[in-house]
Amino acid sequence: MDFATLIGLILGTSVILMAMLTGSEASVFINIPGVMIVFGGTIASTLIKFSIRSCFLAFILALKKAFWQAGDKPADLIKLANELSNIVRKQSLIALENTEVKNPLFKKGVQLCVDGHKPAFIRNVLTKEMTQSIQRHEMSENVFRAMGDAAPAFGLIGTLVGLVQLLSNMQEPSSIGPAMAVALLTTLYGALFANLIALPIADKLKSRTDEERINKSLIIESVLGIQQGVNPQILDELLETYLPTNKRIHSGDANKSQQASEPKKI
Amino acid sequence: MDFATLIGLILGTSVILMAMLTGSEASVFINIPGVMIVFGGTIASTLIKFSIRSCFLAFILALKKAFWQAGDKPADLIKLANELSNIVRKQSLIALENTEVKNPLFKKGVQLCVDGHKPAFIRNVLTKEMTQSIQRHEMSENVFRAMGDAAPAFGLIGTLVGLVQLLSNMQEPSSIGPAMAVALLTTLYGALFANLIALPIADKLKSRTDEERINKSLIIESVLGIQQGVNPQILDELLETYLPTNKRIHSGDANKSQQASEPKKI
Amino acid sequence: MDFATLIGLILGTSVILMAMLTGSEASVFINIPGVMIVFGGTIASTLIKFSIRSCFLAFILALKKAFWQAGDKPADLIKLANELSNIVRKQSLIALENTEVKNPLFKKGVQLCVDGHKPAFIRNVLTKEMTQSIQRHEMSENVFRAMGDAAPAFGLIGTLVGLVQLLSNMQEPSSIGPAMAVALLTTLYGALFANLIALPIADKLKSRTDEERINKSLIIESVLGIQQGVNPQILDELLETYLPTNKRIHSGDANKSQQASEPKKI
Amino acid sequence: MDFATLIGLILGTSVILMAMLTGSEASVFINIPGVMIVFGGTIASTLIKFSIRSCFLAFILALKKAFWQAGDKPADLIKLANELSNIVRKQSLIALENTEVKNPLFKKGVQLCVDGHKPAFIRNVLTKEMTQSIQRHEMSENVFRAMGDAAPAFGLIGTLVGLVQLLSNMQEPSSIGPAMAVALLTTLYGALFANLIALPIADKLKSRTDEERINKSLIIESVLGIQQGVNPQILDELLETYLPTNKRIHSGDANKSQQASEPKKI
Amino acid sequence: MDFATLIGLILGTSVILMAMLTGSEASVFINIPGVMIVFGGTIASTLIKFSIRSCFLAFILALKKAFWQAGDKPADLIKLANELSNIVRKQSLIALENTEVKNPLFKKGVQLCVDGHKPAFIRNVLTKEMTQSIQRHEMSENVFRAMGDAAPAFGLIGTLVGLVQLLSNMQEPSSIGPAMAVALLTTLYGALFANLIALPIADKLKSRTDEERINKSLIIESVLGIQQGVNPQILDELLETYLPTNKRIHSGDANKSQQASEPKKI
């Protein structure tokens, strides 16, 4: 569970609701045609921009990635790489066949090693796997970013429609204020949906993709190191550069003493 | 037929029309000089930005690509590559001459193989073919994006023209409202055309181009693999990285069992 | 003559003029101090941004490139490359000395071949020639883009000056409307100049530069192919990738039949 | 202590406060619900965009990097490299074990040299260390930039909420002014927070990252030069290119005389 | 002296002043608290964004580079390269020691040649020298661009402060106009400072940097050519690609005749 996303959504919604209810009734902020213009328009433009399948996948992926903390921790992957590397040095590459690897990319890499493919081929397959997976994730981010761009535009369109109706038919001065309030509501809906939901989720997907890119680079380097029978200690030294300084387990004596005095170096 | 584009256009138009007709007559939203400023100005600036031929091609391409689902499916291309690869291994490279390949780039690649060109030359020709084709597609996207940038600007220009006329000649207070409504119409036209039509279609063309880039990369890799007589199973392993995990046909036993337990991995 | 630029300018100007003259006199839209703020300010900021020589060259280049269809057609260059390639194969590299080549870059390339320079040197000289020429073109584009960015800003400055004068001296309510109309005129001037002239011409120069980049890449490849005595047919095969599919002259039998059935493939 | 950040914050706050207090009471600018919308909304959207841990680290890092002048001076690093290089030439690579190096990356590099790793491995480890450290710094910059983007948006949302409340309930004309003032306050809060705090701190973190990138490149080059036993004078010559001309200690006679006549060459 | 910068500043200031003085007194446009908000705020945010030293250097560099035409002309550098190349071919590399070279980078390059360093080392040192120098120039550009971004934001903040004061205290209708005029003044100051001074100077520094990049690339290529004893005529041929076509001195007979017929080819 990614609590940040949940806390953010709850905090944002309650702050806005509180501001709305202080000083007026909630009904003032509800306008069904306005909701339809902003959401209908946003969905319409998103459908034209992407295929139905992309939009659908984007939502599934957003739910999975933005609300659940996906992926393995780099430290666990390094530990696993170290274990596998030890197996290869003590037994042989074939012995990896019986190990259990959960991460799909790591599993595929180990399988390719066991099958006896060449390093260049393995790097090629795993790198493409990573690139394609990242491209699919970026598509999901793009769908949400497109919605975040479209919503304020349709909010403005709704306000313009309301203003034109209001101005072309000004009979009673007392009705101008409320009519203008209604016209402004679509701009409010568009700004809220874009800035509280669509754009933040697109950015969350982006940081998830960045994390996965780091994880997958780490896995590819691990698999190639394991296949070439690199010394587990040297492999550790190399892989630990993927961790922030204060999370490193394995470090030389010289480093340890320095870490002790500056434990929170970031 | 790309239903997403069609559904999007119909949904967007009906939502906007519904909002316009709720509370006022349709005639309030019609202003011929405003339509002329926004569309005339947009077309004018697009003509200056590009050549007549580019604009014309952009429209043809947009109709073809945004409304019809173009291109082969990656899975079909991989299947074809596998078949051709089998033919080459069982018979010879020359035997490809009698095979029927529909995709033009694949056909050209196979022809170059049959003609006995070197891999480097084939890669060179096919990559340039891909690059040039993508550049022509991007030109089309650029035309629509330019229209999406110009339309709101000419909407603003129209509104400024209307405001200047209105302000320089304010005799009757009662006519100010309707005159302002008319002035705002051009801004509405510009925003609608940009956000419901021009920019979404530009983005659709962009995602089409991305799909074609993946397809064409897959084809180039297939052709080079086929020519070099790569083992069909290894070729499959390589090409399947272009597919999302849940669409893969061929996978090792180890992968299969894992796929079974996590079938919707994206 | 590039008719698109001319038609665009005429269409844009007439549409705007028509909208201005419908409903008010032309005099309403003329304000000399406003014209001076917008154009004086735009020219001033452009002079600070670039050198006098760059601004001058940008105008010359814009007139040449935006209004006249410059450059050779790729198809003609390919035909010429084929002829030269044939001469080299039938006679010798020295025989090129007597051929007449109009395109300056192609001429220089042929001269370098005749002079007996090495391929790496020729590629180096021609590529730099291309890069420098493109940089000079981009400078011209940048001048127009800078004008297109400055004009709306000085339009806003003019409107602010007008509003401050109007607000600080409101004696007669009836004069507020016309004074505000005059204040808005500079915004209108800025928007019109930017969106109808400066930005479109910058974009036209950009697409011209793209065309030249393709042409010059084609020439460099041709010259290097000619020097290395590449088979004219193979050279054709390579160079035709620079053309859209439906403009290709030379294609294998297999392709021809396919072209016949899908003649408008883009 | 980075005095620029402190002076900037104090100067900015006092100028704004002074302008607020000239002509009205401070209470006019205080509105608790407005503060809650802008800051609550900004924090909410930032939490959704990043993980809680990233947000927390971003604040720690911002306090450390934006207010304290972090990092070694390039000139000191060059001096250190020169000393170490001399030790290696006079004694041996192993003699470095007893030297005291404070900079963590330099220390790690020296340790890797002493451990007898190959240059390619050392470059690989140190470069990754640098890249990962810079990525963590960029994450911190991104958090502040995201806050600087969100704050004006929530300022606008607050103003829209206020305007809708005001317009839908206009009973007493005399209360419109003060209500509108309150509505505008959120826009003011958002603009102030973004332009005086969030965006400038993001930019400060960016220039810190740039300084660190230069320092770390210098260290990597030093370590590799030291390991390969490069002549200390040549190493100096190479490393001094990282310093501005007027800060260079070691330069040939020819340079010295030139420096004398143009001492402030930048 | 760079007359473009001076002419631009004078032209821009006089046009704006003229517009201000036509129709109102100058005093209307002077508001000390407004000036303090815009300039104080801009300086404050710039100090937070950069270090005091960077801001100081940026101003020195801007005065030097934006108002004085800095740097050697490419044609002079090519002439010098030709002379040095002749000396090396007629005498020896050591003979360069007695030549007088004013450009610091060229001088350093020649000195490195005389010192007998290897081409790869010389390229490495000179390229880094160029990169570091360009980075320092870009820092200066960034300071001015940051000021150009901050000024309109603080202009808006000033206007919001003014509007809140005005709206929260509307007693006398006749004072609303002048108070609003004063509020708008900060927006005007911000827009003027950004668009007439800060952004144009940032762009001028950018084009200066581009010129220096070309000059320094030319020098590096010259030095390496001279060291390798390249034929002066071939060196010329290579270096002249850095000049626009119509400024070239040395060109083959074939080119000359072509130049004669198309003398203004750009």
Image (tube, coloured by chain):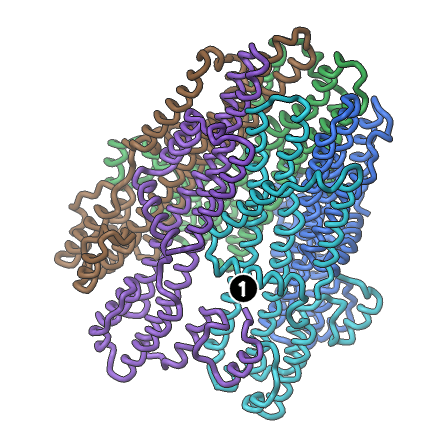
Chain colours: A green, B blue, C cyan, D brown, E purple
**Chain letter of disc 1?**
C
Counting from the top left corner in percent of width and height, residue E9 is at: 45, 46
Q: As drawn, is D69 to the left or to the right of A56?
A: left
User: Residue C26 in the image: x percent, y percent?
Assistant: 73, 42
Residue lying at the far bottom of the rendered structure: C91
Amino acid type at circle 1 is: Ile
Residue drawn at (79%, 19%), measured in percent from left and top?
Answer: A170
Q: Is residue E159 left or right of residue B167?
A: left
Q: Nearer the viewer, residue E6 or E69?
A: E6
Q: Nearer the viewer, residue D194 or A209?
A: D194
Percent position of residue C175, x then y: 66, 26
- Residue D5 quadrant: top left
For label 1, the SS is helix
Residue C69 shows in this picture? yes
- Would you say B172 lies left or right of E99 here? right
The residue at which mark 1 appears reads as C134
Quadrant of the drawing holding the N terminus of chain D: top left
| Position above or below: C141 against E196 | below
Of E263 and E59, which appears nearest the observer?
E263
| Image coordinates for residue D106, horizontal then vertical, percent | 26, 46
Instruction: Say which of D224 and E108 sits in front.
Output: E108
Q: Quadrant of residue C91?
A: bottom right
Q: Residue at x 67, y 71 (%)?
A: C74
Number of residues whose C-alpha sits closer than 10 Å to that of mark 1, classed few (under 14), some (14–19) or many (20 or more): some
